[in-house]
Image: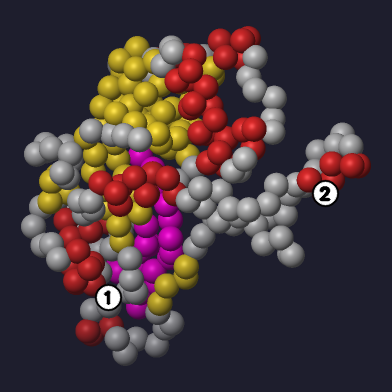
Amino acid sequence: MPLSNMGNARTGAARDHFGMSNPVPAPAGDDWRTTVRRLPELAVVDRADVEAILDAGLVAHVGFTADDRPYVVPMAYTRIGSDLFLHGSVASRLVRALGSGTRVCVTVTVLDGIVLARSAFNTSMNYRSVMVMGETEAVADPDARARVFESLLERLVPGRSARVRPPNPAELRQTLVARLPIDLWSAKVSTGPPDDEPADLAYPVWAGEIPLRLVADRPVAAPDLPEHLMADAPDGRPSGGTWWVRER
């Protein structure tokens, strides 16, 4: 079912957590685009929480129109301060469109669990989700672009940017970096167990949550990696994520 329906019967638990029951506009502005009307008790109004969700994600889905047609493109991204930065190849016509003041809606979702209720209707998911809306602009300053490239690598594997070859001029020309201010946003978080209807509590089926998390498997070396570098596989925890268990 779509995210807009998630948490369908769990509004009571969510209301206890957030203490809200009316449509909630994000503090980014009293704008109809950021007003949470569907399950408003799931709304997130603290900017720090919004930034934490963005930092926990790895892929952004970027929605925009080009040539009068709608597109949604998955893209690598990073957050630096109060801005989102999108990263892609200039060889893509759609990606190039993001560098020319395009209006976009960027969505990042972190899936935290499958919520199994006693009824099909109330079965849902736990998640954290942010939409950021605005106009993108291309980043041309070399130092600013370098900071974005470093941030992108550090989100994946801390310390990696200092160890790999930096991009050369030809590679930089092939890469678009677009900035999107985090000024207009809307966010929702769904947590907790299923909230079944009283009439369903005696139904003979297991109910509860299956927690989910993104976990990487043990690194697989490149086939041409020299033997002396085999033990140099990265270890640790990426920003906002969960890395592999080394002893697996």
Viewport quadrant of the C terminus:
bottom right
Q: Position of residue 59 (x, y in %)?
A: 47, 39
Mark 1 or mark 2, earlier in chain: 1
Mark 1, residues whose alpha carbon is within 10 Å: few (<14), some, or many (≥20)?
many
Q: Is residue 133 above or below residue 119?
A: above
Query: Identity of the amino acid at label 1?
Result: Asp
Image: magenta residue range: 107-127
Question: Relative to the observer, which residue lies in front, 83 or 17?
Answer: 83
Q: Quadrant of residue 214?
A: bottom right
Q: Is residue 100 above or below residue 188?
A: above
Distance CA(mark 1)–CA(mark 2): 48 Å
Query: Identity of the amino acid at label 2?
Result: Ala
Mark 2, residues whose alpha carbon is within 10 Å: few (<14), some, or many (≥20)?
few
Q: Is residue 247 above or below residue 188?
A: below
Question: Relative to the observer, which residue lies in front, 113 or 168?
Answer: 168
The image shows a total of numbered marks equal to: 2
Q: Nearer the viewer, mark 1 or mark 2?
A: 2
Asked whether residue 61 is in view, the answer is no
Q: Position of residue 129 (x, y in %)?
A: 34, 49
Residue shown at 42%/72% (left/top)?
Answer: 209
Query: Label 1, on which residue?
Result: 195
Horizontal arrangement in the rendering, residue 121 relative to residue 22 (left or right): right
Report helix, strand or loop for mark 2: helix
Q: Which mark is residue 231?
A: 2
Q: Position of residue 157 (x, y in %)?
A: 61, 43
Report helix, strand or loop for mark 1: loop
Residue shown at 39%/15% (left/top)?
Answer: 138
Residue shown at 71%/60% (left/top)?
Answer: 246
